[in-house]
C-alpha cells in the first residue's frame, strides 16, 4: 500500500498563510468587521464554558464581529425556535423577548426567519440589546437567510451585535448551522424555546443548554390545538427532558432574577 505524501511545512508556506490571514483581517476591518481570539481580554468568559450537545467543552477559537462587542458582557438569554412558528408562537415569542430585554438581557438568537426573528425584533422594539450568531461570514453578501439582511443591518445600527466563527465570504452549510446552535446556548445564561417540533434544529441548542445544566424554558400555550401542532410538540418533549414551562401567569421578574443569579453546581464541569 502506497503511503500518502505529507506536505512539508516550509517558511515560504508559513509566510503565504500569514499574508492571506492579514489580507482577510484588513479587508474585514474595512467592512467594519473586527476579530477577537480566545486568549484576548475581550473574549466573553461565558463563551469559554461553551459545551456542545454531547456535553463536551467546545468554545470558538475566533470570533468575527460587527457592531458593539461590549453587548457580550450583558447577561444573555437565547430565544430560539422553529422557522415556521404559528401566530400564537410569534405573539408569545415577541412578547417574552420584549420583556426579557426590558429586564436587561441581551437577546441571543440566530437571525433565522420565524422564532429567531421574534427574538431580535422584540428586543429592538423596546430599545433593548440583541446578538445574532451567524453560520456564515459577516459580509452582508454572505448573510443567511438573505430575507433578514435588513434585520442584520438594523441590529448593528441600533447598538446590537453580529458574531460568527467564520471569515468573510463563507457561505452557509448544514454543518455550520448546527455548530452555530451551541454558541446560542454558550453566550447565554438561559435559553427560551418558543416553539419546536420534536426533530427540529432547535433541539441542538436546547440539548447543549441541558448539557451545560443551564436553565431551559419553553412556552406553554393554553390553546390545545397549538400545543398539539407538529411545530410545537417539541416543547412538551423538552419539558420531559428537564426544561420548565413559562406560562402567562408566571412572574417574569422572579424568572429574570433566578437566571441572573444562576450558578453551576459544584459537580459541574465548569469548576474543573
Image: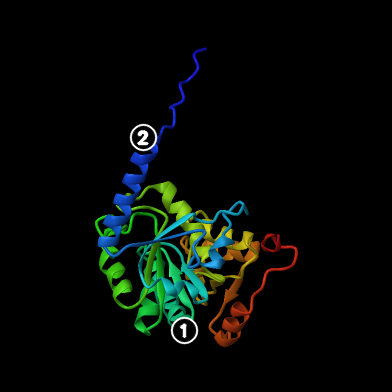
Q: Choose between 22 and 80: the one closer to the eye.
A: 22
Q: Secondary structure at mark 2?
A: helix
Q: Quadrant of residue 162?
A: bottom left
List x then y, in percent, for residue 9: 44, 32
Q: Secondary structure at mark 1?
A: helix
Q: Which residue appears at 33% of the width and 73% of the height?
A: 155
Q: Are marks 2 and 1 in contact (CB under 8 Å)?
A: no
Residue neighbourhood size for the residue with mark 2, other residues' Cα within 10 Å, grouped as few (<14), some (14–19), many (≥20): few
Is any atom of residue 194 visible in this view? no
Judge from the rendering whether residue 61 lies leftward or rightward of residue 156; answer left or right.
right
Of tags 2 and 1, which is closer to the observer? 2
Number of marks in picture: 2
Q: Which residue is mark 2?
A: 12
Q: Residue furthest right?
A: 267
List x then y, in percent, for residue 82: 43, 62
Asked if 207 appears above or below 246 in the picture, the reply is above
Is any atom of residue 245 visible in this view? yes
Q: Quadrant of residue 114?
A: bottom left
Q: Which residue is mark 1?
A: 99
List x then y, in percent, for residue 30: 25, 61
Q: Choose between 121 and 35: the one closer to the eye.
A: 35
Q: Earlier in the sequence, mark 2 or mark 1?
A: 2
Q: Which residue appears at 37% of the width and 35% of the height?
A: 13
User: What is the quadrant of the C terminus in the image?
Assistant: bottom right
**Gap between marks 2 and 1, in whole Å?**
55 Å
Amino acid at each position: 500500500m502506497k503511503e500518502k505524501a505529507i506536505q512539508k511545512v516550509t517558511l515560504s508556506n508559513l509566510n503565504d498563510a500569514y499574508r492571506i490571514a492579514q489580507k482577510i483581517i484588513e479587508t474585514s476591518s474595512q467592512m467594519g468587521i473586527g476579530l477577537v481570539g480566545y486568549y484576548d481580554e475581550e473574549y466573553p468568559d461565558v463563551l469559554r464554558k461553551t459545551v456542545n450537545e454531547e456535553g463536551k467543552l467546545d468554545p470558538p477559537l475566533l470570533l468575527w464581529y460587527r457592531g458593539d462587542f461590549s453587548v457580550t458582557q450583558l447577561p444573555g438569554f437565547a430565544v430560539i425556535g422553529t422557522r415556521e412558528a404559528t401566530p400564537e408562537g410569534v405573539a408569545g415569542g415577541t412578547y417574552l423577548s420584549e420583556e426579557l430585554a426590558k429586564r436587561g438581557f441581551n437577546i441571543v438568537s440566530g437571525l433565522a426567519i420565524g422564532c429567531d426573528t421574534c427574538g431580535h425584533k422584540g428586543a429592538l422594539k423596546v430599545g433593548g440589546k440583541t446578538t445574532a450568531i451567524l453560520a456564515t461570514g459577516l459580509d452582508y453578501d454572505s448573510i443567511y437567510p438573505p430575507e433578514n439582511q435588513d434585520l442584520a443591518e438594523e441590529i448593528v445600527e441600533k447598538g446590537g451585535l453580529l458574531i460568527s466563527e467564520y471569515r468573510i465570504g463563507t457561505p452557509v452549510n448544514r454543518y455550520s448551522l448546527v455548530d452555530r446552535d451551541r454558541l446560542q446556548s454558550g453566550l447565554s445564561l438561559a435559553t427560551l424555546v418558543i416553539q419546536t417540533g420534536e426533530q427540529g434544529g432547535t433541539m441542538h441548542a436546547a440539548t447543549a443548554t441541558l448539557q451545560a445544566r443551564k436553565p431551559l424554558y419553553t412556552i406553554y400555550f393554553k390553546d390545545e390545538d397549538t400545543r398539539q401542532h407538529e411545530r410545537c410538540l417539541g416543547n412538551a418533549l423538552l419539558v420531559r427532558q428537564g426544561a420548565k414551562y413559562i406560562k402567562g401567569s408566571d412572574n417574569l421578574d422572579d424568572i429574570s432574577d433566578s437566571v441572573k443569579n444562576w450558578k453551576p453546581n459544584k459537580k459541574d464541569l465548569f469548576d474543573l
